[in-house]
């Protein structure tokens, strides 16, 4: 996967990869912003999206990006249901209940994927996912460029949605002050459901592009949860631009780590960076 | 106080009889499968008790328990490769786990609640990669990754391993009783009720949490090392695996978090499930995940929460309780 010799290649690839990581982190950041919950199962929802797209592409011959037409509504409904019937109830129980329930959901998704798709590593392949594009003399995989574009498109769309629609404004209001929002006549329970559902939609989109970029297994969810968490930590919670920059930093850490220490260590370096950032700046590089 | 003493003795008798009976199991020729049940029960119980101590009593929802048990297991295993007796390696494994707990407390103790959980979740993942890449001893004997057989334990019988496990399991129950009634336990209770108020009353919040974390690391490490002593080999992917965390969480949550008897009952259920679901290997963790979510939603206090509403259970506990 790594280009050899030239250091420009990993830098550009890491930069482009940042779009994908920001995309993965968006859903996590959104659920945290609105519900003050870090969804431990987020990585597994992303992988669920990857498997959904994988199924539609390999069995129905759909284009993976077109398959989102099916995946998005399914994930939206799933997200709404999970929030309404599982997560929403967990908050009233105890502090650690949402965490334990999310952990349980993560394992259910992992093992369902394992039963349906076996533990083998899968990837979404299309006519264009293996193509490359050129900048100067250097070749880059097209999938990385698509990751970056998808990241920007989803981010802008989400931003516009939150700023311009009634539902978006209601979500923002509920995240800023739940009680005040309730007093203004906003049904915060339903808003939480929508917020979780939208986070799952972003997970579905992230899953498709992840599947085109990397091979994935049923247990990949944890590494992408760590990436999303790291991205959010670096960028500071709630800041979209920060999330994007966080994604780019982590993307570069991964590709440069692979470049200098070999591809096998790139995830390890990523984990270490997350732990180091937690040590020196737990509020995030851009956090207040 | 005087009339409490006879009740203490009578209540203690069934407990002691059970313990002695369990300890005699290897010598009275019970089926090997029974030994295995009690062995697994004891190992899981020691670990579940420690997770309960962390998550239930100290507010540290640690998801890095596999790191402790794996490091201790590796310390013992690698020790046997360089000529250290297994029991020295086992004890040393607890020390390594404790040192590692201190090391990772630097980043993760800055986090609280769910941040702490995710910070700790990353740790076993990182260790797994380390042990995939790093081959401490043995050269190029078995290809890549640190998968090892434990050497020089041929003279250790199943009975001895069983007794060691039983010691860990039962010991952890008494350790919990002792800890929760000590100053440490009182401090933890104060922190749990109101961390800020406890801090301003002179409770050293950071120190208490760190001490709890280290104790849990040592006991989890020892229990893990005993498990690998039984298993006879160790390799990274099953060792630093989230499934360990799942088992400990399930045992604690089914029984009842933040209760002393919870992990005991929960571990029985988990061991029962383990053997019941062994035939459906692929579905086992799926079903366990569903049970975990279900229990948490329907009865957050687990079995103990349901039982405590029952009067005869309360009097039974009072009968056994030696306080």
Image (cartoon, rainbow, N blue to C red):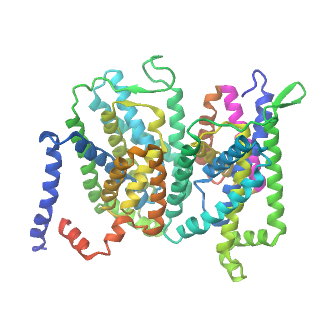
Magenta stretch bounds: A240-260
Residue B298 shows in the view: yes
Relative placement, left or right, of A100 versus A275 is: left
Give me the residue at 69% from left, 83% from top.
A183
B28 with respect to A90 (left or right): left
Which quadrant of the figure contains the N terminus of chain A?
top right
Q: In the rendered image of this protein, does residue A36 appear above or below residue A62?
A: below
Query: Furthest residue to the top?
Result: B140
Foreground pick, A281 / A10: A10
- Residue B257 horizontal/vertical position (percent): 39, 62
Q: Position of residue A243 (x, y in %)?
A: 73, 51
Q: Height in image: A109 above or below B198?
A: above
From the viewer's side, name the closer residue of B234 and A253.
B234
User: In the image, residue B90 lies at what x, y percent?
Assistant: 31, 34
A162 and B313: which one is in front? B313
Is B15 left or right of A19, judged from the image as shown?
left
**Snapshot quadrant of residue A214:** top right
Image coordinates of residue B125 in percent, x first then y, are 53, 40
**Side of A146 relative to B148 (left or right):** right
Residue B27 lies in the magenta-colored region: no
Query: Going 49% across and 62% down the picture, which residue do you hit?
Result: A96
Name the quadrant containing residue B141. Answer: top left
**Which residue lies at the image location 54% right of the left edge and 27% below the top edge?**
B133
């Amino acid at each position: 996967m790594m280009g050899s010799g030239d250091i420009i290649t990993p830098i550009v690839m890491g930069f482009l990869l940042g779009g994908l990581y920001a995309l993965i982190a968006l859903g996590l950041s959104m659920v945290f912003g609105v519900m003050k919950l870090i969804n431990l199962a987020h990585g597994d929802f992303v992988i669920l999206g990857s498997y959904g797209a994988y199924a539609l592409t390999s069995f129905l011959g759909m284009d993976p990006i077109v398959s989102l037409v099916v995946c998005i509504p399914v994930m939206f409904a799933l997200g709404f249901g999970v929030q309404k019937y599982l997560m929403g109830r967990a908050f009233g129980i105890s502090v650690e209940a949402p965490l334990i329930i999310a952990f349980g959901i993560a394992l259910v998704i992992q093992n369902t994927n394992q039963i349906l798709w076996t533990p083998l590593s899968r990837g979404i392949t299309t006519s264009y996912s293996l193509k490359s594009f050129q900048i100067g003399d250097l070749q880059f995989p097209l999938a990385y460029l698509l990751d970056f574009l998808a990241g920007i498109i989803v981010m802008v769309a989400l931003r516009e949605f939150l700023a311009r629609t009634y539902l978006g404004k209601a979500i923002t209001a509920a995240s800023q002050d739940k009680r005040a929002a309730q007093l203004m006549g906003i049904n915060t329970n339903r808003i939480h459901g929508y917020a979780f559902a939208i986070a799952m939609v972003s997970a579905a989109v992230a899953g498709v592009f992840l599947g085109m970029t990397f091979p994935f297994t049923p247990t990949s969810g944890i590494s992408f949860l760590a990436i999303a968490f790291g991205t959010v930590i670096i960028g500071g919670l709630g800041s979209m631009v920060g999330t994007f920059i966080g994604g780019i930093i982590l993307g570069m850490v991964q590709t440069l780590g692979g470049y200098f220490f070999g591809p096998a260590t790139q995830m390890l370096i990523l984990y270490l960076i997350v732990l180091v950032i937690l040590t020196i700046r737990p509020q995030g590089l851009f956090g207040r | 106080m005087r009339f409490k003493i006879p009740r203490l003795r009578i209540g203690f008798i069934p407990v002691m009889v059970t313990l002695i009976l369990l300890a005699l199991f290897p010598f009275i020729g019970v089926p090997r499968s029974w030994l295995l049940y009690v062995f697994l029960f004891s190992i899981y119980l020691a670990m579940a008790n420690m997770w309960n101590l962390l998550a239930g009593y100290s507010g540290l929802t640690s998801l890095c328990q596999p790191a402790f048990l794996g490091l201790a297991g590796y310390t013992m295993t690698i020790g046997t490769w360089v000529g250290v007796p297994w029991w020295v390696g086992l004890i040393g494994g607890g020390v390594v786990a404790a040192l590692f707990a201190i090391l990772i407390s630097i980043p993760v103790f800055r986090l609280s609640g769910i941040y702490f959980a995710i910070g700790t979740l990353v740790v076993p993942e990182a260790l797994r990669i380390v042990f995939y890449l790093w081959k401490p001893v043995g050269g190029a004997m078995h290809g890549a990754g640190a998968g090892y057989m434990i050497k020089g334990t041929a003279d250790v019988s199943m009975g001895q391993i069983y007794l060691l496990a039983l010691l860990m399991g039962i010991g952890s129950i008494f350790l919990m009783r002792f800890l929760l009634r000590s100053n440490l336990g009182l401090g933890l209770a104060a922190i749990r009720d109101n961390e800020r108020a406890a801090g301003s009353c002179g409770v050293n919040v950071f120190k208490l949490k760190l001490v709890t974390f280290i104790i849990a690391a040592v006991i989890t490490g020892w229990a893990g090392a005993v498990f690998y002593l039984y298993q006879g080999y160790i390799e990274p992917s099953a060792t630093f695996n989230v499934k360990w965390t799942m088992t400990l969480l399930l045992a604690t949550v089914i029984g009842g978090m933040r209760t002393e008897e919870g992990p005991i009952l929960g571990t029985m259920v988990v061991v029962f499930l383990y053997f019941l679901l062994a035939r459906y290997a692929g579905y086992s963790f799926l079903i366990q995940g569903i049970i975990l979510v279900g229990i948490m939603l329907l009865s957050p206090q687990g079995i103990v929460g349901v039982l405590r509403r029952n009067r005869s259970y309360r009097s039974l506990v009072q009968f056994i309780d030696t306080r």
